[in-house]
Amino acid sequence: MPKYASLELPETPRLAQNIVHFSRALRRAGIPIGTGRVIDAIHAVLAVGFTEKQDFYWTLHACFVNRPEQKAVFSEVFRLYWRDPQYLEHMMSMMLPTIGSIKEDRKSFMAEKRAVEALLDGHMPQVLDTAEDQDRKTLIEVDASYTVSETERLKTLDFEQMSTAEVAQAKDILHRLTLPVKPLPSRRARTNHRGQLVDKAATFRASLRQGGNIQKLYYKKKVKRWPNLVVLCDISGSMSQYSRMVLHFLHAVTNNKSVGWAKVHSFTFGTRLTNITHHLDTKDVDAALAAAGAEAQDWEGGTRIGECLHRFNINWSRRVMGHGAIVILITDGLDRDQESDLDKEMRRLRLSSRRLIWLNPLLRWDQFAAKATGIKIMLPHVDSFRAGHSIASLQDLATVLSEHDDSGEKLRLLRAN
């Protein structure tokens, strides 16, 4: 735990009320906390005591934190709420626009940002300065209202850089996205009076009822055949924020029956492969993703891409890869499994699919190069290699599907190697 200033009790402490208010701040920062956990926290603090700040910190931590990604947010909200001497100045500085490169510790930066938003609850505090202070300060006004619309800015923003409010807005946009696809050419045809092909079989059958005389020509029309969509989404620790947003997008695609997919099959993988297709069929997105999260037990774990692709090729490929399936692989390619034959499994996956599209959030960096072993092995087997870090990158999928010769960044990276 970071070293914070000593915790001082107010003259008239209201411990229960403060803990309740603290839990509400955590909830606004993105940590799901119900009434039962708040009551448990109050009882736990009463049992442990309120003499040492470190004991108080870990008591609340044990009651409110149950996932690894919640630790940073909890730590920042705790520091700002429980009497950090400079919490107000810190919050104000966090709310001002920042110019420059992104900090190396991006998780800590986003945890601070969400903690500030939770405590301010959307309102900027007013600071009263003395006349002397006012004379020393320079008023700088920045009007960015006409630079770019909020929606357009949000579409290009990295999922990992979004605040809690921006994530909620992004999810609303993702639910309205569609992923249209063109029908595949088919050799089958059905009788249709508006068709342009003569249905010889139907014409001859009708002539038999007239003694062999052909009195009318029957026509047929090629039927439309729609492909399956198969999505393999990496949910390892390095991909957790991206995979959550992608699953919201997949839920929208799965439940939009007007875009033409024969069937949408969704799988998650980290250390093991999990089929979540039936969960995403649920209309309610919150219930669908909650069930999918409960089904996939390897959230934010390690990455075994080769082994998981092997499981897919052996157990699921023949079941879901019919109808000229298009496969979208969403992963950063950082495989930790050195024992699997990743090259063999990628080759088999490519041969089973009509098109294999790889979305990699690491492509958000302009200086990205295929240096990791897993990326080097996987890249030659994909048809298109695209970024997958923002709403705009997911919107570009429609273009990729309509242009069969689109290879994205694949050729550039292969030439660079």
Image: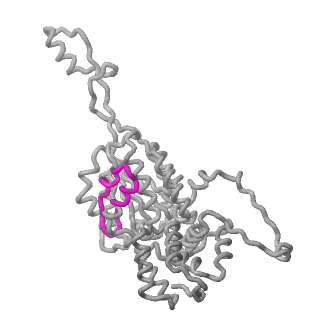
Residue pictured at 55% horizontal, 75% vertical: 77
**Front in this rendered view, residue 394 or 140:** 140
**Taking 137 as reference, is 291 above or below it?**
above
Check the image and tell me how it is coloured: one colour
In the image, taking residue 281 as reference, residue 112 lies left or right, namely right
Q: Is residue 42 magenta?
A: no
Q: Is residue 280 magenta?
A: yes
Residue 368: x, y in percent?
53, 65
**Front in this rendered view, residue 336 or 298:** 298
Residue pictured at 46% horizontal, 49% vertical: 175
**Taking 55 as reference, is 164 above or below it?**
above
Residue 332 shows up from this direction:
yes
Residue 173: x, y in percent?
51, 50
Q: How many marks?
A: 0
Residue 344 shows up from this direction:
no
- In the orientation shown, which residue stands out farthest toward the bottom? 51
Residue 332: x, y in percent?
44, 65
**Taking 187 as reference, is 339 above or below it?**
below
Q: Quadrant of residue 222?
A: top left
Residue 364: x, y in percent?
54, 62
Residue pictured at 48% horizontal, 66% vertical: 370
**Front in this rendered view, residue 96 or 413:** 96
Magenta range is 268-291
**Taking 75 as reference, is 195 above or below it?**
above
